[in-house]
Amino acid sequence: MMLIDFEPGDYVINPENKDWGAGQVQSIIGNKVTVNFENYGKRVINVKYVKLEKIDYEH
């Protein structure tokens, strides 16, 4: 099982697509994390394949 070190409400970035901007975690179900990215909208990310990085984000 993957270790997910964030929870809903936390902010993350996708290091492979930094232009998506900061994303707020909406939900986590198994390996699938739903994230609402500021520049790319809502995406479901499978953390088995994409390593999201938790960030500190000020609005």
Image: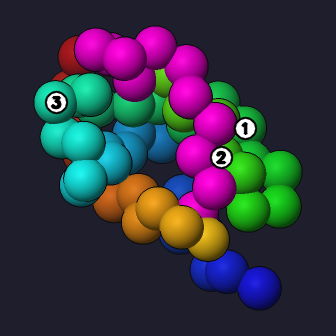
Q: Give residue 8's mark.
A: none
> Residue 18 in the image: x percent, y percent?
18, 40
- In what quadrant of the picture does the N terminus appear? bottom right
- In what quadrant of the picture does the C terminus appear? top left
Q: Which residue lies furthest to the right in this view?
A: 29
- Do residues under tags 2 and 1 come within 8 Å of each other at their CB atoms? yes
Closer to the N terminus: mark 3 or mark 2?
A: 3
Residue displayed at 32% across by 48% down: 14
Q: How many angstroms separate mark 2 from mark 1 (CA)?
A: 6 Å
Q: Nearer the viewer, mark 3 or mark 1?
A: 3
In the image, the segment drawn in magenta is 37-47
* Residue at which label 1 appears: 27
Please name whichever residue, 49 or 56, is drawn nearer the observer in this view of the structure.
Answer: 49
Quarter-of-image position of residue 56: top left
Q: How many angstroms separate mark 3 from mark 2 (CA)?
A: 19 Å
Binning the other alpha carbons within 10 Å of mark 2 as few (below 14), some (14 to 19) or many (20 upward) gives many
- SS for dot 1: strand
| Magenta stretch: dominant secondary structure | strand
Q: Which of marks 3 and 2 is in front?
A: 3
Residue 47 against residue 10 in the figure, above or below: below
Residue 28 against residue 41 in the figure, above or below: below
Type of amino acid at the residue the image marks with label 1: Ser
> Residue 40 in the image: x percent, y percent?
37, 17
| Total numbered labels placed on residues in the image | 3
Type of amino acid at the residue the image marks with label 2: Val
Closer to the N terminus: mark 2 or mark 1?
A: 1
- Do residues under tags 3 and 1 come within 8 Å of each other at their CB atoms? no
Q: Residue furthest left?
A: 19
Type of amino acid at the residue the image marks with label 3: Asp
* Residue at which label 3 appears: 19
* Residue at which label 2 appears: 33
Please name whichever residue, 33 or 16, is drawn nearer the observer in this view of the structure.
Answer: 16
